[in-house]
Image (cartoon, helix red, strand yellow):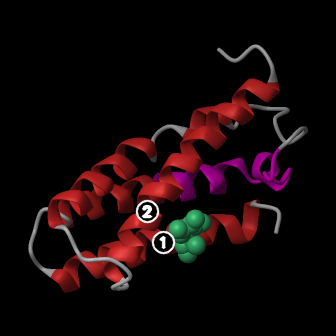
């Protein structure tokens, strides 16, 4: 277990940083900012699916205080937060499956669903 709230904050932020890098690169490919490489895209989707399971453990009680953008509302509405985190994990898993198909519409839809999960949680539970 984490010894200090700061350790939990660092843990979840490390995962979010890796998620943002991998998800951002997928977005760059889908938006045509770089060539679409199916193998790289699929690896990134696998990474996000695995990483999506990491941050939740870091949202321990008391870790709204410190170097974090997490709002105290997370712990006031913990059941809703938890269900949003689960929805994100489910969307990320579906994106990893879609990435193994060659159906670009399917991939784009799964990517959009995952992005909505990111934003939907940030809008409510993350400082601007
Ligand atoms: C990203 C990123 C987010 C999400 C969000 C999706 O690449 O860093 O927080 O996508 O903007 O709407």
Task: Check the image and report above or below for 69 versus 122.
Answer: above
> Residue 9 at x, y = what percent?
73, 35
> Residue 36 at x, y = what percent?
23, 75
Query: What number is the disc on residue 115?
Result: 1
User: CA gap, disc 1 to disc 2?
Assistant: 8 Å
Say if the magenta span includes residue 54.
no
Write the start and end of the magenta stretch as one range.
68-87
Indicate which label's residue lies in the foreground, 1 or 2.
Answer: 2
Q: Is mark 2 within 8 Å of ligand 1?
A: yes
Question: Would residue 90 appear left or right of 106 to someone viewing this image?
Answer: right
> Residue 92 at x, y = what percent?
36, 58
Question: Would residue 127 appear left or right of 120 to someone viewing this image?
Answer: right
Disc 1 and disc 2 in contact, CB within 8 angstroms = yes
Q: Is mark 1 within 8 Å of ligand 1?
A: yes
Task: Check the image and report above or below for 96 versus 117.
Answer: above
Ligand 1 is found in the corner quadrant, namely bottom right
Q: Main secondary structure of the magenta part?
A: helix
Q: Earlier in the sequence, mark 1 or mark 2?
A: 2
Q: Residue furthest front?
A: 34
């Amino acid at each position: 277990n984490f010894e200090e709230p700061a350790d939990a904050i660092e843990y979840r932020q490390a995962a979010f940083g890796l998620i943002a890098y991998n998800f951002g690169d997928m977005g760059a490919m889908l938006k045509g900012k770089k060539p679409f490489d199916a193998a790289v895209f699929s690896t990134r989707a696998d990474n996000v699916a695995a990483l999506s399971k990491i941050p939740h453990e870091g949202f321990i009680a008391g870790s709204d205080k410190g170097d974090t953008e997490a709002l105290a509302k997370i712990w006031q509405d913990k059941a809703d937060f938890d269900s949003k985190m689960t929805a994100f994990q489910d969307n990320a898993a579906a994106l990893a499956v879609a990435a193994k198909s060659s159906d670009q519409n399917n991939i784009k839809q799964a990517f959009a669903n995952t992005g909505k999960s990111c934003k939907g949680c940030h809008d409510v539970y993350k400082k601007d």
